[in-house]
Amino acid sequence: MPYQALISLWLRPRAAFSAVMQRKPTNSSVGLYILAMYITLLDYWLTKNVPSLLMSIAIVVVPIVSVLVLYLQGAILGVVSRWFDGQADALACRTALSWGGVPVTVGAIFGVVGYLVYGQEMLWLERNSTPLHGMVYVISVVSTVLTFYTFFTTSIMLGEANGFSAWRGLAVMLVTLLLIFVVMLVLVMLGAAVYVLAHL
């Protein structure tokens, strides 16, 4: 893994993307995506009442699900990129997605650490309460900023992968998210329709 890219991506996403693409991007991209999924799972486990058996199963299947989701998203990004006259293949899109998503992963780590230190106070927004410690606000703000910063890094990397601007990279990302949302919505509606028909 080109570890220097983990530093340069914060201010020079294009240079970081180019460095990653030169050194077996598949391995590092998959590794980062699986790490992000595990951190998300840890955050969910800490903040929600999840049965131990379900968590045990999730820990085992996370790598498989991560790879499937990453490859699916990469394929969709590749198709959408071509709609915008881009040249990126699925590998480049997967790399941009995984490496561009590093900021949100770091933000999630801040959230997990915050919960381990301050406990239920980190859920102050959900519970509409006031935290006792000022650091809770700081951690929440940092996590939120890093989440939005991911759009910046990923858009620029998608732009570099396709040979066009970051703005067009952002458009590719937003259209892809919209497509995924529509597909999921259609699947939910079909499932609801089948359920209703089965109980008539």
Image (cartoon, rainbow, N blue to C red):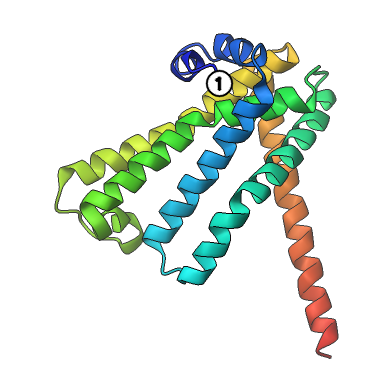
Mark 1 Cα shell of 10 Å, populated few (<14), some (14-19), many (≥20): some
* Residue 109 % position (x, y): 38, 40
Residue 72 drawn above or below residue 163: below
- Residue at 75% x, 51% y is 182
* Residue 107 % position (x, y): 40, 37
- Residue at 67% x, 49% y is 64
- Residue at 78% x, 37% y is 76
What is the residue that sits farthest to the bottom in this orientation? 200
Q: Circle 1 sits in a helix, a strand or a loop, which is it?
A: loop
* Residue 170 % position (x, y): 64, 26
Residue type pointed to by label 1: Met
Check the picture and name the quadrant holding the C terminus: bottom right
* Residue 44 % position (x, y): 45, 57
Instruction: Let me know if residue 153 appears in the view.
Output: yes
Instruction: Let me know if residue 147 appears in the view.
Output: no
In the shown orientation, is residue 156 left or right of residue 195?
Answer: left
Viewer-proximal residue, 25 or 14?
25
Residue position for label 1: 1
Check the picture and name the quadrant holding the N terminus: top right
